[in-house]
Each structure stands twice: as structure tokens, then as C-alpha cells.
Image (cartoon, grey):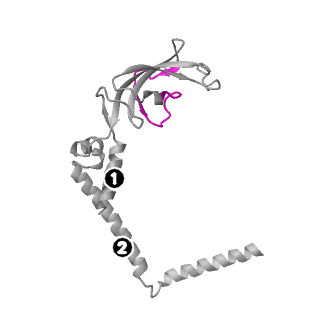
Amino acid sequence: YPSQEEEDEYIASIIAANPAYSEEKDIVVKTADTVNIDFVGKVDGVMYEGGSTDNKGLKCQKGSDMLPGDLESKIVGHKTGETFDATVHFPDDFANEEIAGKDVVYTVTVNGMYKDGEFNDEFVKKYLSGENATSAEAFLNAYRMGIAKDKFATYLKDFIITESEVITYPTSYTKKVQKLMKNKELEQFNAIN
């Protein structure tokens, strides 16, 4: 079976890969949080092309570089459910000429936040149903058995390799090896001459 540490790391990785979405209001956004936002960017009061999420919601996590300019850092400290304005200045050589060298005012709404869930039966049914597990315990038992089988197969292979002694080789095998060696020697001779 896996060690308790291996199992805990596995569960943590599953939880991190399947965060639960919450629209609970007034949660302060911290640097490492993953949030869902909408925004509209305007230059001199006019929305620029491609400057809106069109109220479709955008999942944004720290370091994803999905947001224009330094807008990502300007979300930190605001709360879920809050709408605020943030100004982002774009460099003169920015690819989109419509906003290059300009200040863009983004009206941002923090719709909700993604948080780590709890590994339980409900979590397994919601996120891991494709794994044929009906409960958290059944899922972990299948994981443990898979690890146990892998560890046993590795042990068995290593044991056979280290503890076995070859007494003779089958004749058909030795003939094939001899033929291969002769062909290899002939190739090397022809390559030299």
C-alpha cells in the first residue's frame, strides 16, 4: 500500500485539481486565490475591441497571465461580489494599437472564488465519478490496490533479476543471437572496407 504521506499528497493533488466554486460574498481576494471575474475595459470611456468578458465569467488564477496588463494584481484585496474600477497603463509598443501607450479603465466584478473542497463521498461523486467510485473510501481502496499491485510487480521483477541464475539458454535463442552477431560483424566489415 502507499504510505500515509503518499496518500495524503495524492488526495491533496486531487482536491487542488478540482476546486469548488463559491459565490459567497465579501471574501477578500488574496494573492494565491483563484477567482471568477468579469470585466469591461474602456479607453476615454469607450470599450475597446476584445476588452470585455461579455459577462461569461473568466477563471483567473495567480500567474496565469490571462488578464491584460497588471490587472491581475489589482484584484487582490477586493471582495467577492464587489465591482470596482482599476486603471492599467499599456506600453507604447503594446501589440494592440488601440490601447498601446494608453490608460485603460477596467470595471471589474469579482463573481466568486474557487476553494479547495473536502475529500468526502460528495466530492468523489461530483468530481471522480468516472473512476467508478461510489464513495471516498471506495476510491481510496482502488488507489491503494493499484499502488500495491505496482509495488508488488516492481518487487517481483527486481527479485527475479537479482536472485535468478541462468543455467542454460534455449537453443533457439542462442541461434538467433549468433545470427545477429554474424550480421553485425558483416555490417562492420563492409563499413570499413
Main SS class of the magenta portion in the image: loop
Q: Position of residue 96 (x, y in %)?
A: 60, 23
| In-image side of 72 versus 28 (left or right) | right
Q: Amino acid at mark 2?
A: Leu
Q: Position of residue 110 (x, y in %)?
A: 38, 25
| In-image side of 19 versus 185 (left or right) | left
Instruction: Verify whether residue 48 appears in magenta.
Output: no
Q: Nearer the viewer, mark 1 or mark 2?
A: 1
Instruction: Verify whether residue 56 appears in magenta.
Output: yes
Q: Residue furthest right?
A: 193
Tag 1 and tag 2, C-beta contact below 8 Å: no
> What are the residue bounds of the magenta stretch?
49-71
Residue position for label 2: 156
82 is higher (above) or lower (below) than 66: above
**Which residue appears at 50% of the width and 34% of the height?**
65
In this view, the residue in front, 65 or 122, is 65
**Which residue appears at 63% of the width and 80% of the height?**
182
Q: Position of residue 184 (x, y in %)?
A: 65, 76
In this view, the residue in front, 15 or 26, is 26
For label 2, the crowd category at 10 Å Cα-Cα, with few meaning under 14, some 14 to 19 and many 20 or more, is few
In this view, the residue in front, 168 or 118, is 118
| In-image side of 114 versus 137 (left or right) | right
| In-image side of 75 versus 116 (left or right) | right
Give the secondary structure at mark 1: helix
Residue position for label 1: 10
